[in-house]
Image (cartoon, grey):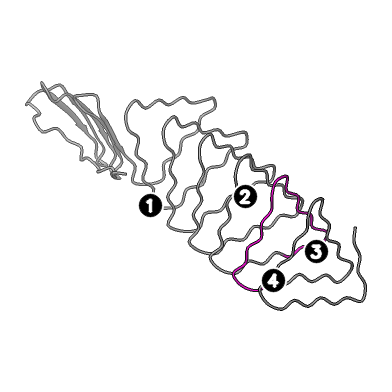
């Protein structure tokens, strides 16, 4: 985004008798310039604050101290061209009602510090196309209530390191199709209580090495 460069006031081709100037003892100045191709209106305060309207209708305003504006009714603002805003300090926007932003093109937010969003109500996000989230650091997701994950098509999960899932309550995995478990290393299944293995068809267990099974109690559904 290009930064706005401040323009200096003053005409470049003012003609004698065409520029009417009023200067006060305190240093205030009012210029009404009727020179051809350099028609201007310039109001200058001794502090350095000024407003100028140039020949082509361009307006330049500079306020050297705090600028305040109070509107008792609504305000409509339309900008036909590009709009650039540069703030060297902090920005705070306080809205007592609802706030809506509509962008017909792309919308991009770039922050060089932390990014935080706080919502006291529900948070709803809807994307008409694809969504991609890339996190170069650690990701933490904590939900105080229930969590539901629904995928209308295929789901692929790839973990480059170890994977650990801890459930304080019951855990149920249901698959309408086939299920395959492939491990390049050892597989351990440990139950502190009863364990049941059932198959509606054939059940086959094959090992290329030794197999040992021992139990003090066997429970089959």
From the viewer's perspective, is the residue at label 3 or at label 4 nearer? 4
Q: Which residue is mark 4?
A: 207
Residue 59 location (% of width, % of height): 27, 30
Separation of residues labelled 2 and 3 (CA atoms): 29 Å
Q: Nearer the viewer, residue 205 or 182?
A: 205
Residue 129 location (% of width, % of height): 51, 36
From the viewer's perspective, is the residue at label 1 or at label 4 nearer? 4
Residue 89 location (% of width, % of height): 42, 53
Return the mark for residue 118.
2
Question: Mark 3 and mark 2 in contact (Cβ < 8 Å)?
Answer: no
Residue 2: quadrant of the picture: top left
The range drawn in magenta is: 166-187
Question: Mark 4 and mark 3 in contact (Cβ < 8 Å)?
Answer: no
Q: Nearer the viewer, residue 16 or 24?
A: 16
170 with respect to 35 (left or right):
right
The disc, 1 or 2, on the residue closer to the chain's N-terminal end is 1
Residue 26 location (% of width, % of height): 27, 42
Secondary structure, mark 3, is loop
The disc, 1 or 3, on the residue closer to the chain's N-terminal end is 1
83 with respect to 168 (left or right):
left
Separation of residues labelled 2 and 4 (CA atoms): 54 Å
Q: Which residue is mark 1?
A: 88
From the viewer's perspective, is the residue at label 1 or at label 3 nearer? 3
Q: Residue at x 72, y 50 (%)?
A: 147
181 vs 30: above or below? below
Secondary structure, mark 4, is loop
Secondary structure, mark 2, is loop
The disc, 2 or 3, on the residue closer to the chain's N-terminal end is 2
For the N terminus, the quadrant is: top left
Asked if residue 115 is among those painted magenta in the image, a careful observer would answer no
Q: Residue at x 15, y 21 (%)?
A: 34
The disc, 3 or 4, on the residue closer to the chain's N-terminal end is 3
């Amino acid at each position: 985004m290009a930064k706005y460069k401040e323009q200096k006031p003053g005409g470049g081709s003012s003609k004698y008798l065409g520029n009417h100037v009023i200067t006060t003892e305190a240093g205030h100045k009012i210029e009404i310039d009727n020179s051809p191709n350099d028609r201007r209106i310039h109001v200058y305060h001794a502090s350095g604050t000024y407003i100028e309207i140039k020949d082509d209708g361009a307006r330049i305003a500079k306020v050297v101290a705090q600028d305040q504006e109070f509107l008792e009714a609504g305000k409509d603002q339309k900008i036909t061209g590009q709009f650039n805003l540069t703030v060297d300090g902090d920005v705070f926007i306080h809205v007592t009602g609802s706030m809506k932003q509509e962008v017909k093109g792309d919308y991009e937010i770039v922050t060089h510090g932390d990014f935080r969003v706080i919502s006291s109500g529900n948070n709803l996000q809807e994307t008409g196309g694809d969504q991609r989230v890339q996190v170069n650091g650690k990701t933490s997701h904590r939900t105080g209530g229930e969590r539901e994950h629904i995928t209308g098509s295929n789901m692929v999960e790839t973990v480059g390191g170890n994977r650990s899932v801890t459930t304080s309550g019951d855990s149920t995995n249901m698959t309408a199709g086939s299920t395959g478990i492939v491990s390049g290393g050892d597989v351990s299944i440990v139950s502190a209580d009863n364990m049941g293995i059932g198959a509606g068809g054939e059940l086959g267990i094959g090992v290329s090495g030794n197999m040992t099974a021992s139990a003090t109690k066997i429970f089959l559904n």
